[in-house]
Image (spheres, grey):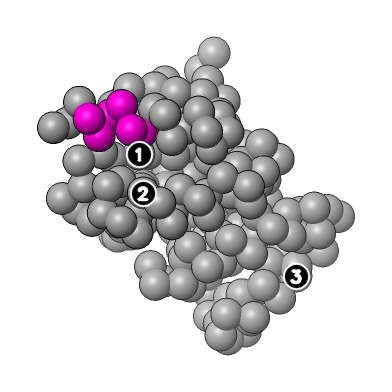
């Protein structure tokens, strides 16, 4: 199945006005291929990562902020992963967002607009309160996300600019599509541990896989 995510269907920006235009896919105005290429070149997207760059193991997680299984992983497994592997320098943990729907895209935009230092704190909140903020009509969800942004010190102006930035939204989707051409992402969460694919798992199983990878890395 083709992974290209059509922003026409999703709606890319959480604009305050109900009559605001949605982004369109690459084939249609105003967000065609030329504009998508412009967005890629003008929007800088950093890799969101924790842990030492010299860690023997790199764990890449492909996850959606509206995925229930991802939320469960982050509430139940991630704290132990961070304490025992990331903070100890054994694992470099990289988050790569998957966009299953417009609410997940908007949430990712808010988390990234909060900046690299606050990104993981915002995603913690988003996963812990997923059932609360991701429920309702688009205007309600957009306001829920603004409220979360305010709790970490973002201003209303910053949030409005963030959530109405069409080039930013397009660049995020382009980035996801680029990763999907390199890595198979059959579902969320999907993990790549030293470039070997793994499906969702509990902490004990994950620890076993990580220990084996650490040992193999010497």
Q: Is residue 214 magenta?
A: yes
Q: CA distance from mark 2 to mark 3?
A: 36 Å
**Residue 99 sits inside the magenta stretch:** no
Give the crowd class for mark 3: few <14, some 14-19, many >=20 residues within 10 Å: some
Magenta residue span? 210-215
Residue furthest out toward the top:
1
Query: Which residue is found at the position 56% from the left and 45% from the top?
Result: 77
Secondary structure category for the residue under label 2: helix
Q: Nearer the viewer, mark 3 or mark 1?
A: 1
127 or 103, which lies in front?
Answer: 127
Mark 2 or mark 1, earlier in chain: 1
Name the residue that disc number 1 marks.
Answer: 59
Q: Which image quarter: residue 164?
A: bottom right
Which is in the foreground here, disc 2 or disc 1?
A: 2
Does residue 90 appear to the left or right of 157 in the view shown? left
**Discs 3, 1 touching: Cβ within 8 Å:** no
Q: Quadrant of the N terminus?
A: top right
* Marks 2 & 1, CB-CB < 8 Å contact: yes
**Residue 60: x percent and y percent?**
37, 39
Of badges 2 and 3, the one in the foreground is: 2
User: For mark 2, what is the residue?
Assistant: 85
Left or right: where 112 falls relative to 200 = left
Residue 143 tag number: 3
* Helix, strand or loop for disc 3: helix
Q: Tell me which label, 3 or 1, sits earlier in the chain.
A: 1
Residue found at x 56% / y 60% = 123
């Amino acid at each position: 199945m083709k992974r290209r995510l059509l922003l026409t269907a999703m709606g890319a920006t959480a604009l305050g006005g109900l009559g605001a235009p949605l982004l369109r896919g690459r084939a249609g105005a105003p967000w065609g291929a030329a504009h998508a290429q412009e967005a890629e070149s003008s929007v800088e997207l950093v890799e969101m990562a924790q842990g030492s760059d010299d860690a023997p193991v790199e764990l890449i997680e492909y996850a959606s902020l509206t995925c229930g299984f991802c939320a469960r992983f982050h509430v139940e497994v991630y704290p132990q992963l961070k304490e025992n592997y990331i903070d100890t320098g054994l694992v470099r943990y990289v988050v790569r967002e998957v966009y299953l729907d417009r609410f997940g895209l908007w949430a990712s935009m808010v988390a990234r607009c909060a900046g690299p230092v606050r990104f993981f704190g915002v995603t913690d909140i988003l996963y812990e309160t997923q059932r609360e903020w991701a429920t309702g009509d688009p205007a309600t969800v957009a306001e829920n996300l603004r409220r979360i942004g305010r709790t970490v010190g973002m201003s209303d102006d910053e949030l409005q600019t963030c959530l109405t930035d069409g080039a930013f939204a397009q660049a995020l989707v382009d980035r996801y599509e680029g990763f999907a051409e390199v890595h198979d992402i059959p579902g969320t969460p999907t993990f790549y541990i030293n470039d070997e694919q793994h499906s969702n798992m509990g902490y004990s199983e994950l620890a076993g896989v990580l220990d084996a990878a650490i040992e193999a890395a010497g």
